[in-house]
Image: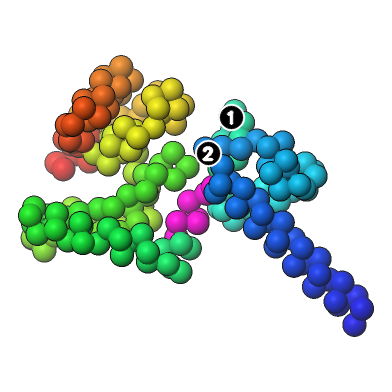
Amino acid sequence: ATASKKGQRNEMRTIARAASVLRALADGTGKLSLGQLAKATGLPRSSIQRIVGALEAEGFVNTQAGQSGVQLGRELVRLGSAVSANLRTLFRPYLQELHQRTKDTVDLTLLMDGTPIVVDQISSTAALRVVSFIGRPLPLHATASGKCHLVNVPWPEAFDLLQQPLHAFTDHTVTSINQLEKTVKQIGAGDFGYDREEYEAGI
């Protein structure tokens, strides 16, 4: 019985430590190093490293090869959409209004791990329509929503988010980083983000 209680306490402590790491990342801006996480949580760096490894295996945090820092993972989007519809509830009226005006599919995307993720959608009822599924990752440089997300990120950070060389999904995909920067600045000045057959031919 004593061993069982001790095991339960250890499990609870492990979960609490993992939660403290996730909260520190949520309260931080961008990526945090292992040292910064250790300082924010008061945990030893060795413990942080083990916890981050376990969380990354489950998709709750993300690290990128060749880059320092830890950030929240996209698995949290799926879990968040399952337990809370607050974000979708907040934006639903705007999605519905835009859908009524355009009679077309409307997506709501969230930037996670440097990737736009579809978190809500109202599909068109037309015979010919574009439909994305919720949870689908989209490329930053080749989609309208991706380009719009880049507007809200300082360009040096956006430059780091873009996987270079930029992948050509179609013959129309913009693969010039300079041209993409120009487009992002135009969107920031009040233009729209467009995808003219840059991600999928014919769309």
Q: Earlier in the sequence, mark 2 or mark 1?
A: 2
Q: Is residue 57 visible?
A: no
Q: Residues within 10 Å of mark 2 (few under 14, many from 20)?
A: few
Give amino acid for label 2: Thr
Q: Residues within 10 Å of mark 1 (few under 14, many from 20)?
A: few
Say which element carries label 1.
loop
Name the residue rendered at 25%, 20% in the picture. Answer: 182
Query: Can you identify the residue that label 1 sits on?
Result: 67
Q: Position of residue 173 (x, y in %)?
A: 25, 29
Q: Is residue 38 visible?
A: yes
Give amino acid for label 1: Gln
Q: Nearer the viewer, residue 88 or 11?
A: 88
Q: Nearer the viewer, residue 27 or 72?
A: 27
With 60 as the anchor, is 83 left or right in this view?
left
Q: Give the vertical position of 176 relative to 117 (above or below).
A: above
With 70 as the anchor, is 3 left or right in this view?
right
Quadrant the N terminus occupies: bottom right
Q: Indicate yes or no whether the magenta region holds residue 188.
A: no
Residue range (magenta): 72-78
With 180 as the anchor, is 114 left or right in this view?
right
With 15 as the anchor, is 98 left or right in this view?
left
Question: Marks 2/1: CA distance?
Answer: 16 Å
Query: Can you identify the residue that label 2 sits on?
Result: 29
Q: Position of residue 154 (x, y in %)?
A: 40, 27
Q: Give the vertical position of 141 relative to 88 (above or below).
A: above
Q: Position of residue 161 (x, y in %)?
A: 44, 31
Name the residue rendered at 35%, 56% in the picture. Answer: 119
**Hey, which quadrant is residue 142 in on the image?**
top left
Q: Nearer the viewer, residue 51 or 41?
A: 41
Name the residue rendered at 55%, 52% in the picture. Answer: 59
Q: Position of residue 155 (x, y in %)?
A: 39, 24
